[in-house]
Image (cartoon, rainbow, N blue to C red):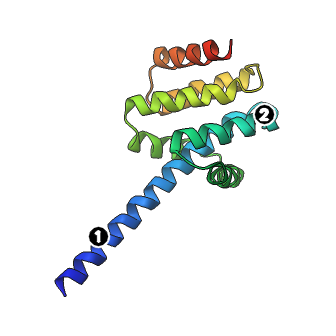
Amino acid sequence: MLDQILSLIGNAAQTEAANRQDRIRLAAAALLVEIARVDEGADATERRRIAELLAQRFALSSTEAEVLLQEAEEEADRSSQLFAYTREIKDAFDYDERVELIELLWEVAYADDRLHHLEANLMRRITGLLHVDDRDSGEARKRVLARRS
């Protein structure tokens, strides 16, 4: 009987951990969607880049990344609560992981080969909400630009 109770508790903990991971992935994907949409909407290039970045960052298949992207687009349609997304990320990611996410956001911002002033403004807001230093965000941006040249 005790083994069954412990098994149920263990299963509940595993389910909660999986749900938390799903929320973190969705929050990160929603931020990527928000940065792509802030200028004149996400074009096919930005959308494709988001799917690639999600697949790489979270070790997803292309199909899983596309499903996550669709969920993030629906989430972004329902809510533009940057604070909720960034809080989820800030609570779950260590500092280096948050810098890595900032780098992914810069990748999306530059996916169409230009940086719109609204994208730059949103990047500053997200950087602050994630408690990432401006210097580290700038370094992440430089790494993205170097890869793109």
Image quarter of the N terminus: bottom left
Q: Amino acid at mark 2?
A: Thr
Q: Earlier in the sequence, mark 1 or mark 2?
A: 1
Instruction: Give the secondary structure at mark 1.
Output: helix
**Disc 1 crowd, CA 10 A, few/some/many (<14, 14-19, 20+):** few
What is the spatial separation of the Cα atoms under label 1 and label 2, in whole angstroms?
43 Å
Q: Is the residue 118 above or below the residue 76 in the image?
A: above
Residue 113 seen in this snapshot: yes
Q: Is residue 84 left or right of residue 43?
A: left
- Measured as percent of width and height from the top left, residue 109 is found at 68, 27
Instruction: Give the secondary structure at mark 2.
Output: helix
- Judged from this view, the residue extending furthest toward the front is 61
Residue 45, disc:
2
Q: Is the residue 1 above or below the residue 34 in the image?
A: below
- Measured as percent of width and height from the top left, residue 106 is found at 62, 25
Quadrant in the picture for residue 115: top right
**The one of 133 and 2 positioned closer to us in this rendering:** 2
Residue 135, disc:
none
Residue at 49%, 17% (x, y): give it: 134
**Disc 2 crowd, CA 10 A, few/some/many (<14, 14-19, 20+):** few
- Measured as percent of width and height from the top left, residue 74 is found at 70, 55
Q: Is residue 44 left or right of residue 75?
A: right
Residue at 68%, 11% (x, y): give it: 149
Residue 43 seen in this snapshot: no
Q: Is the residue 111 above or below the residue 2 in the image?
A: above
Residue at 65%, 48% (x, y): give it: 62
Mark 1 touching mark 2, by CB under 8 A?
no
Query: Disc 1 designates what residue?
Result: 10
Q: Amino acid at mark 1?
A: Gly
Q: Is the residue 134 above or below the residue 71 in the image?
A: above
**The one of 10 and 127 positioned closer to us in this rendering:** 10
